Image: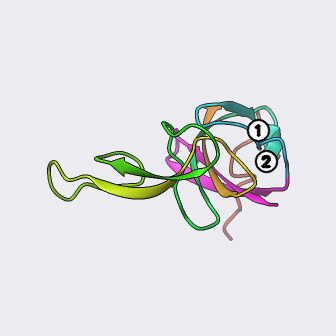
Amino acid sequence: MAFKVVVSDSKTGKSYQFETESTALIGKKIGDEISGSVVELEGYKLKITGGSDKCGFAMRHDIHGAMKMRVLLKSGPGYNVKEKGLRRRKSLRGNTISKDITLINTKVVEYGSAPLGGEPESIE
């Protein structure tokens, strides 16, 4: 199972996508810090901020576990409110990474020595 890991750099405002076959991510939760070596970023520390499963259902930090649930929402990740006071039942994933998760969103907490985007290409 391959994970797509999106790494957001808050200094530059850019994000970078990596693929990994590592099983070290299974069991981690939203808010956990992981080593950047999982996606070949030596010296970096990454914080998990969210993700989605193979069907596109978003992960939510306040649903515990790895299962998919139908929850009643009034705001937050997975639901945009159209009118004040409107609530809706939506299917969402829990906050734990399992084999069904395909996309993991992270942000950089500690920077390593190498640049995040690799070597800049020279324009000739």
Horizontal side of 70 relative to 41 (left or right) equals left
Q: Quadrant of residue 32?
A: top right
- Magenta stretch bounds: 1-21
Closest to the observer: 11 or 1? 1
Figure check: 43 above or below 115: above
The residue positioned farthest toward the left in the image shown: 84
Q: Circle 1 is placed at which residue position?
A: 36
The colour scheme used here is rainbow
Figure check: 62 above or below 98: above
Residue at the spot 85% in from the left edge and 55% down from the top edge: 21
Residue type highlighted by circle 1 = Gly
The kind of secondary structure the magenta stretch mainly shows is: strand
Q: Residues within 10 Å of mark 2 (few under 14, many from 20)?
A: some
Which image quadrant: the N terminus? Answer: bottom right
Residue at the spot 65% in from the left edge and 41% down from the top edge: 96
Residue at the spot 85% in from the left edge and 49% down from the top edge: 22
Dot 2: element: helix
Q: Circle 2 is placed at which residue position?
A: 39
Q: Is residue 111 among the parts visible in the rendering?
A: no
Residue at the spot 64% in from the left edge and 36% down from the top edge: 29
Horizontal side of 26 relative to 33 (left or right) equals right
The reply to whether dot 1 and dot 2 touch (C-beta < 8 Å) is yes
Looking at the picture, how far across and down is residue 110, in whole percent? 66, 28
Is residue 30 found inside the magenta-colored segment of the image?
A: no
Looking at the picture, how far across and down is residue 34, in whole percent? 73, 33
| Gap between marks 1 and 2 measured at Cα | 6 Å
Residue type highlighted by circle 2 = Val
Closest to the observer: 101 or 8? 101
Q: Quadrant of residue 24?
A: top right
